[in-house]
Amino acid sequence: LEPLGKHLVANVRPAILALMGSAIFLLLIACANVANLLLVRASLRERELAVRAALGGNRWRLVSPLLSEALVLATAGAAIGLLLAWMGIRVLRVLGPENLPRLETIRIDFAVVGFTALICLAATAVFGMLPAWRASKPGVSNLLRGSGRNAGLLGGNALRSAVVMVEVALSFVLLVGSGLMLRSFFELQHTNPGFDANRLLTFELDGNDGGGQKPEERAVAVRKIQDRLRAIPGVEGVTAAIPFPLAGGFSPIRWGLGDALADPGRFQAADFQIVLPGYFEAMRVPLLAGRTFTEQDNLPKRDFVMIDDVLARKAFHGQSAVGQRILIRIRGPQPEWVEVIGVIPHQREESLTEPGREQVYFADAFVGSGRVNSWALRTGNDPANYGSAVRGAIAEVNPNLLVTHLEPATSLIEKAQSETRFSLLLIGVFAIIAGVLAGVGLYGVLSTAVRQRTAEIGVRMALGAEQKRIFQLVVGQGFRLSAIGI
């Protein structure tokens, strides 16, 4: 039991939260950058602020101009951000995966504008308050006795360096996250779905649910479709199932061993799939033990099943599963014994990222012939070339049948990778921007440090310091800040 809203976004919620976290990190890095620039700007105005304080200016009179400047920057940034978001939503809809809930409803509304206004005020508080507060309490006597146009820069160096270290730390977190997402994407590309998707064309048949037909009549209709599809030149195999791997629509049934008769709590959940004989051969699913379904198995009251290796390990703990019996509840409330005739590797049925439950496979006649509606053709070349031939063959058998979701099985693999690819793209963009911003912030600190130490550098050069040593002096500070941040 769970709320419907939570169920609808269960698959994408972790990715969306990760992206929100990345956006917040990026905002903090930008705020830190602006805070650093305002610290330098405030430092250059410390003499002016000291004069104002000496003439009786209170803290609020000193702080308010700096906060106003920060608010102007934040408001301009928020306005530009809304404009970029409005344009970016169109790109997002194109790049976003099809299974992202309510992607088409994403828009800028009053809630977004209100949220942006709050973020604007929060950003002002984050990057405006610290420089303003520090500048509002100048050491009046020391500053007024100081000389040189860069006297104000001498203070606050430790604070600016700390801000840069935070920037580097946050950007490095995003870079690590981007790297992990990239690794996850590569892992998905090498994940075996349990069948060979190459040169496999898949589609669904709708429009004739067999209402009023007997199971024998539905079985005859299925065989006619198989025979007509096999007659297409270049087709090497034809099969059907319900549901189809990676296409969704799986639901659990209960299975158990003899002890479950006395204690129903020992029943466990397994996904099930109804298949035609020849399904595993056409899908090129390797057989681990036993045999696959034959036409003789696809008859009523033939209580044979196939299972995957996950269920075999759970039920029989390393023993051979072939010839063993398990209890199944699928045709009614009462469990019934079925015999295991074969074991295959586990298939990824709902997602490439999650292994999913153990699996049980039934022949089509087990629950009443003609239930299968997801079809697959093994072709000799590019499956995209067979679309019109498939539609024509189905129309010859039954013009009332509608061919839908006609696509190569590789498209199912690509759709299963789409969420990770989408998250990788966005987090990668965030990470690159964060790295650039952190570099800009580091440059600002080093530039300020050089301005502070201009006289010192001149003395060092006058005393014979080589250009390389001066370079190491400045760049070494940047390396130290970056190393601490990392």
Image (spheres, grey):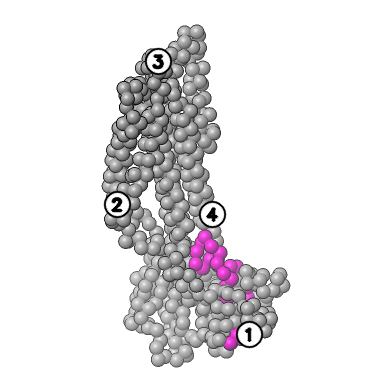
Q: CA distance from mark 1 to mark 2?
A: 61 Å
Sequence-first tag of 1 and 2? 2
Q: Nearer the observer, disc 4 or disc 2? A: 2
- Residue at mark 2 to residue at mark 3: CA–CA distance: 47 Å
Evaluate if marks 1 and 2 touch, with contact meaning CB atoms under 8 Å apart. Answer: no
Residue to which mark 3 is pinned: 146
Q: Earlier in the sequence, mark 2 or mark 3?
A: 2
Residue 372's x, y, as percent?
46, 79
Q: Earlier in the sequence, mark 4 or mark 2?
A: 2
Q: Secondary structure at mark 3?
A: loop
Q: Amino acid at mark 4?
A: Glu
Q: Which residue in the protein does label 1 denote? A: 337
Q: Secondary structure at mark 4?
A: helix
Q: Amino acid at mark 3?
A: Gly
- The magenta span reads 334-360
Q: Residue 345: say if magenta.
A: yes
Residue in front for this viewpoint, 48 or 418? 48
In percent of width and height, residue 217 lies at 44, 90
**Number of marks in the image?**
4
Disc 2 crowd, CA 10 A, few/some/many (<14, 14-19, 20+): some
Mark 1 vs 3: CB contact within 8 A:
no
**What is the spatial separation of the Cα atoms under label 4 and label 1, in whole angstroms?**
39 Å
Tag of residue 225: none
Residue identifier under label 4: 187
Looking at the image, tell me whether mark 3 or mark 4 is earlier in sequence order.
3
Query: Rounded to the nearest whole Å, what is the CA distance between mark 4 and mark 2?
Result: 39 Å
Residue 454 x, y percent position in the rendering: 42, 16
